Amino acid sequence: MLAAGGGSAAAVSSVCDSEGYAYAGYEGGVAVRGVTATITEIAPTEVGQGQVLAWIGVGNEQGGPGGKPEWIQAGLIAFPGQSPRLYYEIARPGLGWKRTPFGDPLAPGESHRLAVVESSRNRWRVILDGAPVSPVIFLPRSHGSWVPDAVVESYKDDPSACNAYNFGFLSIGFRPIGSGWKPARPAVVFKDHGAKVKKRGHGFEAVARF
């Protein structure tokens, strides 16, 4: 594991032979009304093919009415040859999903405080550094239904390409139903394909080369 601020994520492994989705990070164990974290790109993200995302959010592929996809997430996204950008993404039953990038490409080491919160029953919003950056989104039957995630996600379909990253998620907070913000206590820690996830206070550092 690399120390925060040191080296390159490429040091984790010299071989890249995986494909598909891979995750590293935390999942909570109880339904929430919000999730928040400060996300930092510690070392330059390398995207050989596909995409790498560092995000917080709630919902899943079967999260909506009738088992249809429904979720809301926000974070950083990187594509081959590009610096990471901020984005949020919404999936609604029967409407598919839509990703909205915003802001300028991020500078190395730039940090932002992101939150996905339920502003009222079944209505969610993305907050960046204390200010709303999305409209209020109605997600039916979401109230009391979803556990939170704070993860790095890599996707590629070419096993010979390499995706590498080193992200920090600090001061992760979960907001359980009927409660205020609480320091994150993960029920599951994802470490696909040998990713390294090191606890740092109420958060973690994730390093991988897939």
Image (tube, grey):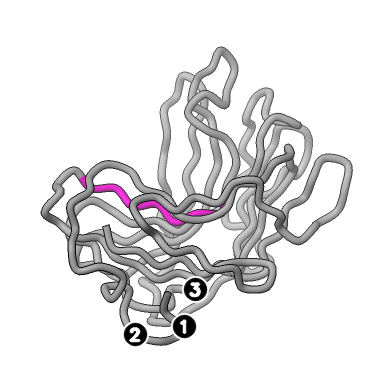
Task: Name the residue: 38% across, 82% down.
Answer: 108
For the N terminus, the image quarter is bottom left
What residue range appears in magenta? 149-156
Q: Which mark is residue 3?
A: 1
In this rendering, would 94 be left or right of 135? Answer: left
Asked which quadrant contains residue 84, the reply is bottom left
Extreme residue in the left direction = 160
The disc labelled 2 sits on which kind of residue?
Gly
Answer with mark 3 or mark 1, whichever residue precedes in sequence: 1
| Mark 3 vs 1: CB contact within 8 A | no
Does any portion of residue 160 appear in the rendered image?
yes
Task: Identify the secondary structure beneath mark 1.
Answer: loop
Task: Name the residue: 57% across, 53% down.
Answer: 26
Q: Which residue is mark 2?
A: 7
Extreme residue in the bottom direction = 6
Answer with mark 2 or mark 3, whichever residue precedes in sequence: 2
> Could you give the CA–CA distance between mark 3 and mark 1, rounded to whole angstroms?
13 Å
Q: Position of residue 79 (x, y in %)?
A: 26, 59
Q: Which residue is mark 3?
A: 40
Q: Is residue 5 magenta?
A: no
Task: Identify the secondary structure beneath mark 2.
Answer: loop
Tag in front: 3 or 1: 1
> Could you give the CA–CA distance between mark 2 and mark 3, rounded to whole angstroms?
15 Å
Q: 43 and 34: which one is in front?
A: 43
Query: Badge 2: how crowded within 10 Å, few (<14), some, or many (20+)?
Result: few
> Could you give the CA–CA distance between mark 2 and mark 1, rounded to whole angstroms?
8 Å
